[in-house]
Amino acid sequence: MSITLDDRDFSFTYDGSWFHGGQPQFEYDNTTTGTTTAGSMALFNFTGVSVSVFGTVGPINYAGQNVGAPISSYQVDDQPAVTFTAPAQGGNLYHYNFFTSPTLGDGPHQLKITNLNQSSYLWLDYVQYTPSSATSSSSSSPASTNGQQPIPTSSSTALGAQTEPSSSSSSSPVPQTSVQTAKNNNASIIGGAVGGVVLVVAALALIFYLRRRRNITQALTEEKSLWISKNESSDLTLFLIHGHRSRQCSSQPS
């Protein structure tokens, strides 16, 4: 059983000028990584007994110019590099097998991919490698290129070489940038930000509630004190008036 990894997987390390592309429903995980700069390299580290590289072959005519077919080399560890020249054609070839290694010794390996053509577009789509637990034979075979049928994939959708009419363009290039080796986890960042906002709002609501309750309690206490004070003053006034009248009555002759 082979393992399929997208060109954006963290196992890839890109050096040189690379850019992102991708055709939904045609390329694996809807992504590719491309270059037009000779000498740009991609390193893929894996542990297993074989590895294959798949990509998209675009038309040799781009924007009215003949850019030629992509040429790239593939080297596993210290083995001799294998050069691959893509077929020259007018349409797109998807899931095209650029390279398949011979059977390797069980253990960690590094695959180095180098672009050799300065004008054409080299589009990397995905790799498939066979881990040591999935092999049943120790026999070796020579490295190969130019195959259009990928080895079976562990993905739920079977991958096969697909073609597109010549009127369609290859994966659209974007301005050259340094490729990030991992996709941003925007969902986690957004979730954390929303959670922080909710926590702050809840804290402010609690503070507002406690302050309002304290103000209401203080107002009720002051109102009660004022009411008691008024009642005591009224009772004292009545008492004084009553005492004054009583003294007047007692002072009058009988």
Image (tube, helix red, strand yellow):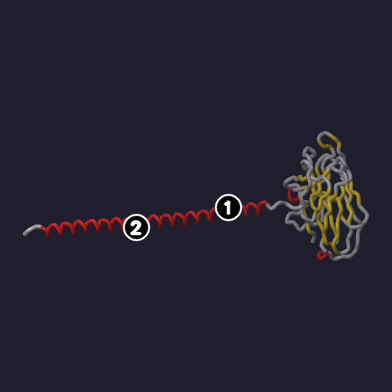
Q: If the image is split into quadrants, where does the C terminus sit?
A: bottom left
- Label 2 residue SS: helix
- Residue 172 percent across, percent down from the top left: 77, 41
Q: Quadrant of residue 169?
A: top right
Q: Is residue 193 left or right of residue 3?
A: left
Residue at x 43%, y 55% (from the top left corner): 215
Between marks 1 and 2 in the image, the one whose residue lies nearer the viewer: 2
Classify 95 as above or below 254. Answer: above
Which amino acid type is marked by label 2? Ser
Circle number at residue 197:
1
- Give percent across and percent down for residue 26: 75, 47
Horizontal and vertical percent position of residue 73: 89, 50
Mark 1 residue type: Val
| Residue closest to the eye, 35 or 203 | 203
Q: Which image quadrant is residue 117 in?
A: top right
Residue at the far right in the pictured view: 80
Residue at which label 2 appears: 225
Q: Nearer the viewer, residue 154 or 32?
A: 32
- Locate residue 225: give its quadrant: bottom left
User: How many numbered circles are shown?
Assistant: 2
**Which part of the image, by quadrant, shows the N terminus?**
bottom right
Disc 1 vs disc 2: Cβ atoms closer than 8 Å? Answer: no
Query: Eyeballing the image, is 134 above or below 149?
Result: below
Of the two numbered discs 1 and 2 on the same chain, state the one appearing first in sequence: 1
Q: Residues within 10 Å of mark 1 (few under 14, many from 20)?
A: few
